[in-house]
Image: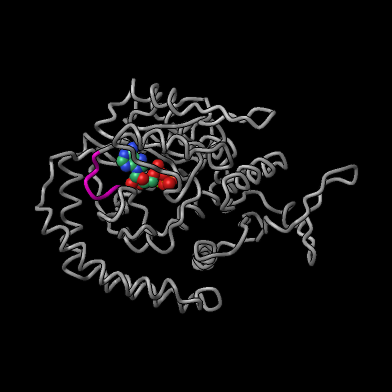
């Protein structure tokens, strides 16, 4: 056996990878990466859970699909595998860069890719002295940010290693800015300092673009992105109440996305990224907002059908059957006029404003089964498995 799927828990994405591997005739081994003892010493390396010895699974694996969800665990997993002589998708180098929004943006910027203006201040908002006394740095940090980004246009404070919209905070005035800076505490999702970004006037949607590379082949960008859309929150993350659509991508955007992939994947033969991008639409809006809001409201009603299936616990026990229900519900949602209308507005907007697109994040282990796959038609498990296979063959 050559390809192993490493995960903390087998959720929909992992079950989807297993199902796709079956369909493609690719054999997969499984490596749990939570309650397992990885031991190194004079007896060599072993990997054992309470019930099973996984050492052979480790030795037999040539390529590891790293699906550990926590960024730290994922970085550790790729690194361990590489030292053990295996290849990981993605590599520890890639995990290290994607771990941090700042590190990602630094690399993209260096390659000349458009990004939102981003400011990093290495100082933490609060310093706690040995005697317990607190020193507050919010005002100084706010001054540093304000000197770089006009506050009247909005400043976004973000946890450097956060996910799912956590600790992404918008400030429109000085009091908000200081309060938001104060909220950032050094910890696992924000190891150090404070990151601020100009507010991109992205209207109601942003994009998630998939790029991947197989060993020995040129990188590819999938022609259609997932669009997350809605006016519920300036963060378009779906569990904040926003909806999912798709958008065809102009060639210029696909080319830029490939360039992002090449930059972030430099030095590795195979990789996959889900790039987050925003379009600075500003006042170049191609539809009446009242009409758009009506369409989003009716799309939201149709979306409840999808949500109902997502909440159905049978996904864990009868995955394939549940998946059929999910696909059917999504198809019904996509067939609504409201979906078609919003999709058209997004596609026209992306086309018109393609020069105003900025990349702001790269996800190295994206969720895909429930939304990206059904909205865009790309089952990310396929490029993932093909990339792994290409490494086995190379
Ligand atoms: N500078 C910004 N301007 C406007 N919206 C932003 C900005 N940064 C983030 N957002 C919104 O918040 C969402 C989450 O931010 P992101 O940086 O992708 O972090 P994560 O997805 O890891 O939580 C984005 O998808 C976007 O909708
Ligand atoms: Mg994001």
Quadrant of the image occupied by residue 377? bottom left
Residue 177 vs residue 328, the one in the foreground: 177
- Quarter holding the C terminus is top right
Image: 334 above or below 58: below
Residue 162 location (% of width, % of height)? 49, 44
Magenta-tinted stretch: 201-206
Indicate left or right for 313 with 370 as reference.
Answer: right
Relative to 307, 247 lies left or right: left
**Magenta stretch: helix, strand or loop mostly:** loop
Residue extending furthest toward the right: 42
8 on left or right of 387: right
- Tell me: 320 left or right of 259: right
Relative image position of residue 181 (x, y in whole percent): 44, 34
Image location of residue 68, percent across then percent down: 59, 53
Q: Residue at x 45, y 26 (%)?
A: 120
Residue 218 in which image quadrant? top left
Residue at 33 percent across and 34 percent down: it is: 155
- Viewer-closest of 117 and 378: 117
Q: Position of residue 272 (x, y in %)?
A: 47, 45
Of residues 2 and 110, the one drawn nearer to the viewer in this rendering: 110
Q: Is residue 107 above or below residue 99?
A: above
The answer to if 200 sits in the magenta stretch is no
Residue 37 visible in the snapshot = yes
- Look at 21% across and 46% down and name the residue there: 203
**Residue 221 appears in the rendering:** no
At x 33%, y 31%, the residue is 174
């Amino acid at each position: 056996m050559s390809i192993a799927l490493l995960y903390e828990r087998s959720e929909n994405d992992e079950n989807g990878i297993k199902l796709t591997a079956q369909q493609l005739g690719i054999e997969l081994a499984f490596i749990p990466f939570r309650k397992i003892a990885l031991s190194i010493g004079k007896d060599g390396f072993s990997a054992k859970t309470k019930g099973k010895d996984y050492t052979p699974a480790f030795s037999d694996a040539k390529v590891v699909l790293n699906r550990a969800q926590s960024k730290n665990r994922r970085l550790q997993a790729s690194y361990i595998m590489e030292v053990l002589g295996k290849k990981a998708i993605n590599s520890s180098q890639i995990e290290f860069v994607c771990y941090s929004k700042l590190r990602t943006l630094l690399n993209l910027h260096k390659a000349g890719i458009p990004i939102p203006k981003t400011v990093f201040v290495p100082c933490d908002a609060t310093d706690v002295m040995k005697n317990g006394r607190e020193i507050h740095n919010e005002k100084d940090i706010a001054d540093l940010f304000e000197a770089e980004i006009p506050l009247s246009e909005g400043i976004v404070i973000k946890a450097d290693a956060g996910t799912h919209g956590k600790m992404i905070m918008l400030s429109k005035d000085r009091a908000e800015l200081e309060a938001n800076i104060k909220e950032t505490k050094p910890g696992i999702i924000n190891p150090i300092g404070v990151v601020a970004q100009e507010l991109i006037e992205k209207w109601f949607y942003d994009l998630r673009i998939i790029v991947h590379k197989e060993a020995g082949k040129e990188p590819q960008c999938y022609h259609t992105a997932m669009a997350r859309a809605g006016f519920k929150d300036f963060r378009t993350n779906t569990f904040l109440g926003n909806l999912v659509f798709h958008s065809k991508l102009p060639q210029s955007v696909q080319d830029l996305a490939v360039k992002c992939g090449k930059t972030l994947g430099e030095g590795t033969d195979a990789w996959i990224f889900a790039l987050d991008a925003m379009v600075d639409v500003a006042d170049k809006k191609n539809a009446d907002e009242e009409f758009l809001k009506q369409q989003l409201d009716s799309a939201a009603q149709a979306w409840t059908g999808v949500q109902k299936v997502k909440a159905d616990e049978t996904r864990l026990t009868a995955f394939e059957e549940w998946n059929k229900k999910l696909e059917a519900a999504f198809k019904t949602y996509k067939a609504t006029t409201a979906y078609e209308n919003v999709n058209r507005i997004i596609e026209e907007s992306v086309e018109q404003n393609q020069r105003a697109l900025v990349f702001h994040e790269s996800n190295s282990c994206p969720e895909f089964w429930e939304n990206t796959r059904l909205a865009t038609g790309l089952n990310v498990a396929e490029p993932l498995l093909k990339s792994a296979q290409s490494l086995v063959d190379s």
